[in-house]
Image: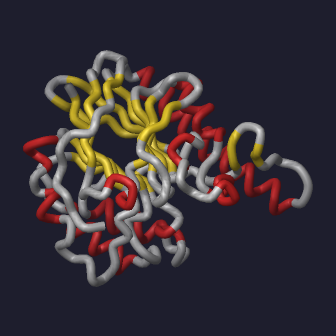
């Protein structure tokens, strides 16, 4: 079994130092890698990113992350990414990475993603240029995810995980107001996952949502936003044989 720890929306500020570190230091007992599903900071400043970096630097497992909308707020995502990468975090945007776990190769494809809505109630590339660009940006994110997952398949990975901030399915948004679903995710992300294939999809962003979902193609989806899982992280098991068995493990309880 491959043990994947995951959490998103930790929203760390300058007063957050040390909040998650004690729990993260237990990862070697229960997980093989840690996924961070975006919104790692409150306002997307490099100073906040340094707090995150100190929380995860030198951990006993590989850390892979995508950024979220909060991490873009200060309009310095490249600086935030650089701070995290300097701490050893593999930050993905339309990219993939492979982690070796006990002789098995776990591939993670990542993108922040974006909104647009879901089948039957979604935006389209029609009308004003701003509306067209809204959906085209989502499509570019989804295409990057699709290409990265295909690359991992070509590399012969034993398991593949799609890591995003925005949701690929409406299932995990249950609990959020219907009016804001278009701003919480897009079906284009799920289409990319189903087309390229994955064993598990992990996202955050929907604080009032639900943990469990599934794509129309049968890929398990988990919303790991900390306000949803109410822990420092959840752990999911992958069989590493092209089949997923996502299951929450006991993980350190932390205040949200």
Residue visible at 32% across and 60% down? Answer: 85
Residue that sits furthest to the front in the current view: 175
Residue visible at 59% across and 43% down? Answer: 170
Q: Is residue 134 above or below residue 198?
A: below
Task: Say left or right for 44 vs 90.
Answer: right
The percent coordinates of residue 140 (x first, y second) are 65, 46
Residue visible at 48% across and 31% down? Answer: 149
**Quarter holding residue 29:** top left
Residue that sits furthest to the right in the current view: 127
The chosen color scheme is secondary structure
Q: Is residue 214 above or below residue 241?
A: below
The percent coordinates of residue 135 (x first, y second) are 74, 50
The percent coordinates of residue 38 (x first, y second) are 43, 58
Residue visible at 51% across and 23% down? Answer: 218
The percent coordinates of residue 4 (x first, y second) are 26, 39
Residue that sits furthest to the top in the current view: 241
Q: In this view, does 53 lie above or below 16?
A: above
Image quarter where the N terminus lies is: top left
Image quarter where the C terminus lies is: bottom left
Task: Say left or right for 250 vs 207.
Answer: left
């Amino acid at each position: 079994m491959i043990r994947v720890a995951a959490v998103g929306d930790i929203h760390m500020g300058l007063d957050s130092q040390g909040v998650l570190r004690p729990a993260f230091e237990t990862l070697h007992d229960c997980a093989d890698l840690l996924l961070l599903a975006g919104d790692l900071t409150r306002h997307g400043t490099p100073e906040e990113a340094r707090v995150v970096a100190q929380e995860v630097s030198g951990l006993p497992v590989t850390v892979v992350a995508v950024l979220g909308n909060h991490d873009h707020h200060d309009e310095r995502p490249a600086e935030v990414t650089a701070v995290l990468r300097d701490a050893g975090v593999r930050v993905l945007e339309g990219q993939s990475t492979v982690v070796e776990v006990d002789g098995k190769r776990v591939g993670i494809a990542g993108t922040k993603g974006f909104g647009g809505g879901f089948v039957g109630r979604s935006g389209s590339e029609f009308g004003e240029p701003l509306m067209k660009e809204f959906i085209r940006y989502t499509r570019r994110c989804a295409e990057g995810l699709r290409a990265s997952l295909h690359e991992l398949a070509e590399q012969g990975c034993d398991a593949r995980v799609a890591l995003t901030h925005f949701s690929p399915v409406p299932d995990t948004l249950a609990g959020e107001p219907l009016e804001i679903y278009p701003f919480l995710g897009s079906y284009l992300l799920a289409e990319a996952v189903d087309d390229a294939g994955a064993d598990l999809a992990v996202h955050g962003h929907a604080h009032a949502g639900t943990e469990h979902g599934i794509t129309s193609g049968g890929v398990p989806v988990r919303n790991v936003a900390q306000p949803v899982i109410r822990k420092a992280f959840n752990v999911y098991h992958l069989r590493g044989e092209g089949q997923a068995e996502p299951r929450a493990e006991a993980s350190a309880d932390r205040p949200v």
